[in-house]
Amino acid sequence: MSSSTFVCRNQSCGTPWEPNEVVIRNEGQGLLFRCPLCGARNYVERFEAEDGSVVYEQIEGRPFL
Ligand SMILES: [Zn+2]
């Protein structure tokens, strides 16, 4: 089992988060989580593995819509 760690993109924050430490939701511009510490938006992409498990990977900037 590999779990990717997120890193807050706010340069003055940069806090690493485990996926289970943040809440991923869609605020209308794609999936994102807000850094629990500074509130910065961090966009993620959802991937579904063949076994049906869902993983999220942090992406640069915003997703294309
Ligand atoms: Zn942060």
Image (cartoon, helix red, strand yellow):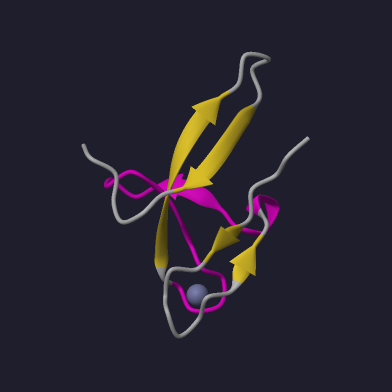
Residue 23 in the figure: left or right of residue 59: right
What residue is at 29 percent from the left and 44 percent from the top?
63
Residue at the limit of the structure toward the top, as seen here: 50
Residue 23 or 14: which is nearer the viewer? 14
Q: Nearer the viewer, residue 51 or 60?
A: 60
* Residue 47 versus residue 8 in the image, above or below: above
Q: How many marks?
A: 0
The image quarter in which residue 40 lies: bottom left
In what quadrant of the picture does the C terminus appear?
Answer: top left
For the point 59% across and 35% down, the residue is 55
Q: Quadrant of residue 9?
A: bottom left
Q: Residue furthest right?
A: 1
Query: Quick check: 1 left or right of 25?
Result: right
Q: Residue furthest bottom?
A: 12
Q: Residue 38's spot in the image, x, y percent?
A: 48, 79
* Residue at 23% across, 40% down: 64
Up the image or down, 20 lies above or below 45; here it is below
- Magenta highlight on residue 64: no
Percent of width and height locating residue 7: 54, 64
Residue at image position (48%, 34%) is 46
Magenta stretch containing residue 27, yes or no? yes
Q: Is residue 22 above or below residue 25?
A: below
Instruction: Write down the region rendered in magenta.
Output: 19-39
What percent of the width, then of the height, locates residue 4? Answer: 64, 48
Q: From this view, report whether residue 48 is shown above or below residue 63.
A: above
Quadrant in the picture for the N terminus = top right
